[in-house]
């Protein structure tokens, strides 16, 4: 390696170290800002499923409870705590949906929205990665 290319290599290494330091700082900042997610529990998981679906019929909810080995009285407890609303259809079927209180207190829907934002950012990242402005860094 000649002296000129050695100096250029050293500049590249310093640039990489600076960039790596900045990325580490950003990661620390993001970790400090990330809200604590609630621990996974059967109630939250079921309410999250209902929230994502929008509404669930009683028979299907019974099936989900049975799969988890939970008593059907769980439904009454959620209605009493104002986490579930229920209504009767004209044909006699019973439907349930989560309440705004459940969404607010249990932070329902945040995982789905995080996945949506990740999908949206991928295309923007790809566009920037191959942009003319970014190619200037490839020549350093």
Image (cartoon, rainbow, N blue to C red):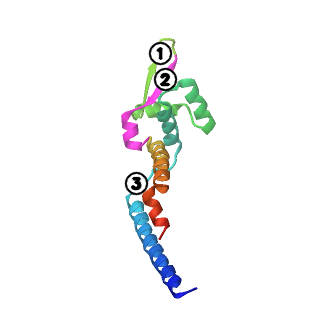
The percent coordinates of residue 95 (x first, y second) are 49, 23
Mark 1 neighbour density, 10 Å: few (under 14) some (14–19) many (20 or more): few
Which image quadrant for residue 128? bottom left
Give the CA distance from mark 1 to mark 2: 7 Å
Q: Give yes or no for residue 95 being in the magenta stretch.
A: yes
- Look at mark 3 in the image and give the residue it sits on: 35
Number of marks present in the image shown: 3
Residue 89: image tag: 1
- Split into 4 quadrants, where in the image is the N terminus? bottom right
Q: Which residues are magenta?
A: 93-108
Which sits in the foreground, 9 or 78?
A: 9
Which sits in the foreground, 117 or 139?
A: 139
Residue 95: image tag: 2
Give the CA distance from mark 3 to mark 1: 39 Å
Give the CA distance from mark 2 to mark 3: 32 Å
| Placement of 111 over or under 79, stated as above or below | below
- For marks 3 and 1, give the one nearer the viewer: 3
Does residue 69 appear to the left or right of 7 in the view shown?
right
Mark 1 touching mark 2, by CB under 8 A? yes
Mark 3 touching mark 1, by CB under 8 A? no
């Amino acid at each position: 390696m000649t002296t000129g290319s050695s100096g250029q290599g050293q500049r590249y290494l310093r640039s990489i170290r600076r960039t790596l330091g900045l990325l580490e700082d950003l990661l620390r900042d993001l970790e400090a800002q990330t809200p604590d997610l609630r621990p996974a529990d059967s109630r939250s998981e079921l309410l999250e499923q209902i929230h994502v679906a929008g509404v669930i019929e009683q028979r299907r909810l019974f099936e989900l409870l049975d799969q988890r080995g939970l008593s059907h009285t769980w439904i009454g407890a959620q209605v009493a705590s104002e986490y579930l609303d229920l209504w009767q259809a004209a044909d006699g079927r019973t439907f349930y949906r989560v309440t705004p209180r459940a969404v607010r207190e249990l932070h329902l829907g945040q995982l789905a929205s995080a996945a949506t934002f990740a999908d949206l950012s991928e295309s923007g990242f790809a566009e920037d990665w191959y942009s003319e402005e970014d190619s200037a860094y490839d020549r350093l």
